[in-house]
Structures are given as structure tokens and as C-alpha cells.
């Protein structure tokens, strides 16, 4: 009996123990599956589901011939995980010695999860870190840009450390080049590194679109070399050159000096040299503007090419109580109007401009002075053209020979392009697939006026059978603290080269040479002629 | 008519086979997904290598270096305009 009772007790006890055990399991299951269902679902998703944002590679920039002006490259950046350093002391010693900025940041933020030591490491830095043997320093690859044509740096621009455009074309077309990122949700297990089970697209981005510009990289190099040679020869402070196809408005070459290496911007301190001064700076260009005063007078019919103008045979005169100076080389007596412009006589041109009166402003405005060209490039300046309402008694005279009007070299190139394009409007542009309005271009000047002004511009050069070269030079004093400094000059030469249907407009600009008593005819004009000849060879137009 | 025991055996067996096929199909799918990802990774690495080679090509084609090589190593001189003459077809055939 006792044995049976003990047996029953044990089985009952074991039964209740198992009931308790299974009860605990059921309760736990209830808690996990029902009561805390949301919590564990979220925890599981956090562990297995990862949201990934992928940025498309930045699209390249091409020149008109398909050569790359900007392409992608990878750079190496070094980083550490401050919260999980294995050997902090040697790391800190290393950083203190070689990367002091990173060392200071580590001292301030030693509990952060992630910290860059330096981005875009040079080869020397990479070798230094590798040889240090510090396992806490890790590398990662970041996208960057490489620019094969340094002479186009101020036009193409550069990207910042996050590969976003900073200026130039890189900035102007940043959103087009960068594309938009895509966001994915990946389902991974705890052990997989790169691999996932499932990938779901949350946000579909777009790839970057390449940009093609009108520049010719070979021509860009040629023009840049010629500019550097002349600047070096005359020890000039700075210079620029631009070449345009006046029939279409395409900018074929655009270069400035001094320039910078877009592939080595770590030590770039003077941001002034990153500007594309052809577009972003304006000047009073002096005698080169006589071209347009003459064109205006011819268009208005107030003068003819062979009309004799009294230039009074002196350097200084008073015309309607206003003093007019002209340089010694341009002093002349009674000469045909064509020679007034060729000799660049200020007295003669002022007398002719007086016949125009306030309508000179309208003609200048027609040529685009005082208004932006509308080129798709950041920082374009519109220049200044004094409205007749604000004119003083000197204004008309000053305007006739290039003062009281400031324009950029691009505006000057556009104005010359109008002459080269037989009086039709020209819209300069940089992007090859940009819509142009030249097909429906408006006629701004009569054919007869254009032919006449071309005759004037041709006279400066001894014409050959091979091509026709027309140009006008300008030497202007620089305004310093409100006063024109006769010892500081800018030298401009703008010209047109033609051979049959082939036409190009070239504008060159040199700023401040140390030599005294020099003029654009000896500094800027030879540069234009050299570029013109190189153009003909490059374009196979002989 | 099947016996009851046979029916149960066939029923369970069929379901086991279907279960096996499902697991097999899913594991094949995972394998193929892995293969795709491996290939994508390889493609990415090859594109990076291609980019590096393109960069090196452009460095080698640098205008300044080419000009210096032509002037110094090959002793070439820049061509002048008067050195170029365009020959007409008649002249070419006469010379031949």
C-alpha cells in the first residue's frame, strides 16, 4: 500500500512539474508572440533589414570631340572608430605627430562612433599610415574627380570634398551630373557581409547625365600656351583669351592666366585665380570700343568711310569745352573716317560720335553692352552702360572711345561676333546640346554697315590670299581709387578671321605690364595673330 | 479503393516531397541571388579598374607632356602657316 501511495505521489509531482514547465513555455510564447509582438518584430527588422542609400557615379564632362574634361577617380580616406579602439595610446601618438587636426578632434570627441582622420589622402599619407601598422586606422574609398585639361579649370570648375560642384560647369550642372540617389531595403542575416536575401527599392534614383561642352580641348591647349608665352614675355600680371564661332555662337576655347591645377587644390589659397574672368569680370576696354562707335555712326548714316574728318593734328584739343586727348601715334590731320578708326584717333571718333547723340546708347545696347549675354555659367557680370539720363557733358565723348562703358570679354566677343555674322544677333553658349536662337537670329545691323566696318578692321593688317584678318586693339588706363592711372593699362585686341565660310572671333586681353609706353598693338595684337594662325592650322583651313 | 493506412501514407509522403521541393527551390533561388550579387560586385570592381586605366590613359595623353616629348625627344618643331600648302587633285596627279 505504501509503495503504491509513494508511486502515485511521485507521478503526480512529476506531472505537475511538467505542467508547470509547459505552462511557463506557453506563457513565454504568449508574451513573445502576442503581448510583445511589435517589440520583437521591430528588433528583428532592425537586425535583418538594412536601409541602404546608393549614390550614382558622377557623370563625366566631355568636350565637343568626345574628349573627357572631367572624369571620376577614387580617392582614399582614413577613418577610426573612437569608441572601439584597440590600442589608443600608439594611435594618439601617431596622430599627434602626423595628423594634428585629427588628434585635436579625437581629444574633443573620443566617444563618437566614427571619425575621419583625413579625406582624399595623398600617396605619401597612405604609405605613412600603412607603414605605421596601426590596425585602428582603416581606409575607405570615396569618389572624386580628375581633370585632364588644366587650362580649362576655370570653365569646368571643380568639386568639393563631398564631390559636389563648387564653381564653373561642375556647379552649373551639379544636379544633372550628380543624379539622384536610390534607397533600398535589404534583408540580410547576421553573418552576411555584402550579401542579402532580398532587395526592395524604396526610392528609385536616376543616374547622372553627362554634359558636353562646346570647347575643343586641343584648341584650348593651343590658345593657353600662346597666352602663357606672351604673358611670360611681357611679364604681365594676368591675361585671357576666348575663341568663338560667330556663325553658331559656340565657344571653342576660353582660358585665363594665372590659372591653377584642378587636380591639386589642397594648397589653393588664392580663390581669385579660380574665376573665369572672361565672364565674371568687366573692364573699360578703351579704343576697341571705337569699332562699335564707328559701326553705330555708319548704321545711322551720319558718316561714310571716305568722309574727311578733322583730327586737328594734335594730342590734346577742346571739343565743346571738353578736353580730348589722343596718343602721339594716332595724331593726324584731316583724314578719311576709315583712317580715324584705323589710327585710333580719339578726336576724330568723338566728333563723329557727337553726331549720334544719345542714340549711341541705343546702338551700344543693341550690341549687348550693359546686359548679360545669358550664357549658362555662374557669376556672369552684365557690365555697365551709362544711360543718357545720367550723362554728363563728357559722357558721349568718353563712350566713343571706350570709357564710361564696361563690359566683359564675353560681351566684347559677342559684339564682334555680330559683325562677323553679317549683322545678325549671336548668342554665345557653352553646352553643345543647348537650344540656340541663332537660327531665328534677328538682324541688328544693315549689311552695308557691316561691310563698311569690316573694311575698316581689315586695314590694320596686310591681307594675304590665305585668309582675311580683321581686328581692333584697345589700350585703356586702369581706374584706381577713382583716378585713371596712366602707368597701369589693360591691352585688348579683338578680331575676326575669315576664309570662305570659315569664321572665328578671337578676343585677347592682357592686364598690366611693367614696361612703360607700350600699347595693345605691340602686346595684344601679336597674340591675336599667333592664335589666328594656329587656329587655321588646327582647323585645317589652309 | 485505397486502404486508410495507404491513403495516409501517400498523403504524408506527397506533402513531404512538396516540402522538400519548396526548400530546394528556395535554396536554389538564394544561390542564384548570391551569384548575381557576386557578379555585380565583380562588375563594380572591373568598372573601377577601367576607370583607373582611363585616368592613366588621360594622364599619359596630357597635352603638355606630349608637346615636351615632341620638342625634346623627337626634336620636332611647331609647324608654321607658310609651311602648309594645299595641293589640288590635278597637282597631285602631275607629281605622281
Image (cartoon, coloured by chain):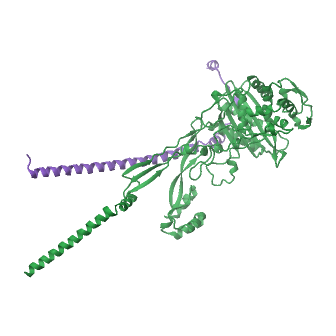
Which of the two residues, A540 or A295, is positioned nearer the viewer here?
Answer: A295
- Report which colour depicts chain B: purple
Whether residue A386 is visible:
yes
Q: Quadrant of the C terminus of chain A?
A: top right
Instruction: Please tell me which residue lies in front, A333 or A484.
Output: A484
- The colour of chain A is green
Q: Residue furthest bottom?
A: A2
**In the figure, A423 relative to A155: above or below?**
above
Foreground of the two, B16 or B72: B16
Quadrant in which residue A359 is drawn = top right
Q: Residue at x 70, y 43 (%)?
A: A280
Asked if one can make out residue A497 in the rendered structure from this viewpoint, the answer is no
Residue A38, quarter of the rendered image = bottom left
**Residue A299 image point, x, y percent:** 78, 26
Tell me residue A135's x, y (percent): 48, 64
Q: Residue at x 28, y 67 (%)?
A: A27
> Is residue A196 toward the left or the right of residue A375 in the image?
left
Q: Considering only vertical position in the picture, is A445 above or below A184?
A: above
Q: How many marks?
A: 0
Question: In the rendered image, which quarter is residue A431 located in?
Answer: top right
Quadrant showing the N terminus of chain A = bottom left
Amino acid at each position: 500500500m505504501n509503495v503504491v501511495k509513494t508511486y502515485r505521489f511521485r507521478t503526480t509531482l512529476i506531472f505537475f512539474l511538467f505542467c508547470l514547465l509547459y505552462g511557463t513555455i506557453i506563457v513565454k510564447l504568449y508574451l513573445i508572440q502576442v503581448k510583445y509582438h511589435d517589440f520583437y518584430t521591430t528588433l528583428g527588422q532592425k537586425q535583418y533589414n538594412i536601409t541602404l542609400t546608393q549614390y550614382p557615379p558622377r557623370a563625366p564632362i566631355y568636350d565637343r570631340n568626345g574628349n573627357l574634361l572631367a572624369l571620376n577617380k577614387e580617392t582614399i580616406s582614413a577613418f577610426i572608430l573612437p569608441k572601439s579602439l584597440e590600442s589608443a595610446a600608439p594611435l594618439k601618438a601617431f596622430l599627434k605627430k602626423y595628423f594634428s587636426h585629427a588628434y585635436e578632434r579625437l581629444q574633443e570627441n573620443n566617444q563618437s562612433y566614427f571619425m575621419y582622420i583625413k579625406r582624399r589622402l595623398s600617396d605619401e599619407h597612405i604609405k605613412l599610415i600603412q607603414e605605421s601598422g596601426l590596425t585602428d586606422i582603416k581606409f575607405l574609398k570615396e569618389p572624386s574627380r580628375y581633370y585632364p585639361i588644366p587650362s580649362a579649370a576655370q570653365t569646368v570648375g571643380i568639386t568639393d570634398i563631398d564631390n559636389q560642384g563648387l564653381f564653373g560647369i561642375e556647379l552649373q550642372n551639379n544636379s544633372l551630373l550628380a543624379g539622384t540617389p536610390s534607397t533600398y531595403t535589404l534583408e540580410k542575416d547576421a553573418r552576411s557581409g555584402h550579401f542579402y536575401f532580398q532587395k526592395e527599392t524604396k526610392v528609385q534614383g536616376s543616374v547622372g547625365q553627362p554634359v558636353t561642352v562646346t570647347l575643343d580641348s586641343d584648341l584650348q591647349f593651343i590658345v593657353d600656351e600662346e597666352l602663357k608665352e606672351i604673358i611670360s614675355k611681357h611679364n604681365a600680371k594676368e591675361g585671357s583669351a576666348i575663341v568663338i564661332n560667330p556663325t553658331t555662337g559656340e565657344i571653342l576655347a576660353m582660358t585665363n592666366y594665372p590659372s591653377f591645377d584642378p587636380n591639386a587644390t589642397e594648397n589653393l589659397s588664392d580663390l581669385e585665380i579660380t574665376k573665369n574672368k572672361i565672364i565674371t569680370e568687366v573692364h573699360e576696354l578703351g579704343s576697341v570700343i571705337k569699332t562699335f562707335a564707328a559701326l553705330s555712326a555708319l548704321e545711322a548714316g551720319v558718316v561714310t568711310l571716305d568722309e574727311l574728318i578733322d583730327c586737328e593734328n594734335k594730342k590734346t584739343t577742346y571739343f565743346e569745352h571738353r578736353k580730348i586727348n589722343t596718343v602721339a601715334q594716332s595724331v593726324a590731320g584731316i583724314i578719311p573716317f576709315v583712317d580715324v578708326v584705323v589710327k585710333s584717333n580719339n578726336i576724330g571718333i568723338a566728333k563723329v560720335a557727337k553726331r549720334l547723340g544719345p542714340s549711341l546708347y541705343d546702338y551700344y545696347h543693341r550690341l549687348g553692352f550693359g546686359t548679360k549675354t545669358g550664357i549658362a555659367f555662374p557669376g556672369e557680370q552684365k557690365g555697365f552702360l551709362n544711360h543718357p539720363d545720367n550723362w554728363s557733358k563728357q559722357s558721349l565723348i568718353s563712350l566713343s572711345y571706350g570709357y564710361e562703358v564696361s563690359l566683359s570679354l564675353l560681351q566684347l566677343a559677342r559684339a564682334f561676333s555680330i559683325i562677323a555674322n553679317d549683322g545678325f544677333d549671336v548668342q554665345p553658349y557653352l553646352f553643345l546640346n543647348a537650344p540656340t536662337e541663332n537660327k531665328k537670329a534677328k538682324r541688328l545691323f544693315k549689311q552695308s554697315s557691316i561691310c563698311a566696318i569690316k573694311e575698316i578692321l581689315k586695314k590694320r593688317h596686310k591681307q594675304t590670299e590665305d585668309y582675311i584678318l580683321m581686328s581692333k586693339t584697345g589700350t585703356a588706363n586702369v581706374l584706381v581709387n577713382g583716378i585713371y592711372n596712366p602707368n597701369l593699362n589693360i591691352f585688348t585686341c579683338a578680331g575676326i578671321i575669315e576664309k570662305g565660310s570659315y569664321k572665328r572671333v578671337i578676343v585677347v586681353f592682357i592686364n598690366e605690364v611693367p614696361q612703360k609706353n607700350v600699347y595693345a598693338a605691340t602686346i595684344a595684337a601679336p597674340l591675336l595673330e599667333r592664335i589666328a594662325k594656329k587656329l587655321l592650322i588646327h582647323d585645317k583651313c589652309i | 479503393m485505397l486502404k486508410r493506412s495507404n491513403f495516409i501514407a501517400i498523403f504524408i509522403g506527397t506533402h513531404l516531397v512538396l516540402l522538400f521541393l519548396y526548400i530546394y527551390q528556395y535554396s536554389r533561388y538564394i544561390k542564384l541571388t548570391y551569384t548575381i550579387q557576386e557578379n555585380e560586385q565583380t562588375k563594380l570592381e572591373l568598372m573601377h579598374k577601367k576607370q583607373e586605366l582611363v585616368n592613366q590613359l588621360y594622364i599619359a595623353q596630357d597635352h603638355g607632356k606630349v608637346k615636351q616629348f615632341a620638342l625634346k625627344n623627337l626634336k620636332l618643331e611647331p609647324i608654321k602657316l607658310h609651311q602648309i600648302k594645299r595641293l589640288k587633285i590635278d597637282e597631285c596627279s602631275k607629281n605622281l
